[in-house]
Image (cartoon, helix red, strand yellow):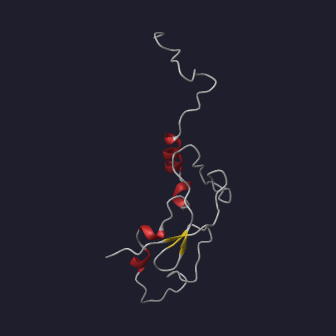
Amino acid sequence: MKKKKETQLEIPLSIDETLPHQINAPSFKGTGIKMEAPFVNQHGVIIGDSHYSSANSPLENWTVETDPAIMSGDEWVHPTNDIGWNTTENHELLESKRKPQAVPFMHPTIDVSKGTD
């Protein structure tokens, strides 16, 4: 099955690499993960805009004939604006990607602890 290319939208949702409109949303700042814009998937549904409903969504047009599998797969999940990022496990994952804030306790180029142990 060939995957149709998604269309990325230029809708600014993040401020300083975080999503302030979500109470537990993590900050991606300093993690190396780039915040991504919302996109339109092959079904014409905007993913990642934080509105969570779309006129083209199978959820909005559900019938007894609708196969739930139509809403499975990566095209339904936004890489950086997904509710899954609000979990403790994913907050810890992001924290592990940040460089430690060693200043002012470390010299920027010299290991001052060398030979002290």
Front one among 115 and 69: 115
Quarter where residue 50 is shown: bottom right
Q: Where's residue 108, x and y in %?
A: 57, 24
**Residue that appears at 61% across and 51% down:** 17
In the orientation shown, which residue stands out farthest toward the top? 116
Q: Where's residue 75, x and y in %?
A: 45, 70
Q: Tell me the quadrant of the picture where the C terminus can be found.
A: top left
Q: Where's residue 69, x and y in %?
A: 39, 77
Front one among 91 and 48: 48
Horizontally, is 73 left or right of 111 in the view? left
In the orientation shown, which residue stands out farthest toward the left? 1
Q: How many marks?
A: 0
Horizontally, is 92 left or right of 14 in the view? left
Q: Is residue 86 above or below residue 108?
A: below
Front one among 4 and 81: 4
**Residue that appears at 60% across and 68% down:** 49
Horizontally, is 21 left or right of 48 in the view? right
Q: Is residue 117 above or below residue 58?
A: above
Q: Where's residue 11, x and y in %?
A: 63, 66
**Residue that appears at 62% across and 27% down:** 103
Q: Is residue 110 above or below residue 29?
A: above
**Residue that appears at 48% across and 46% down:** 93
Q: Tell me the quadrant of the picture where the N terminus can be found.
A: bottom left
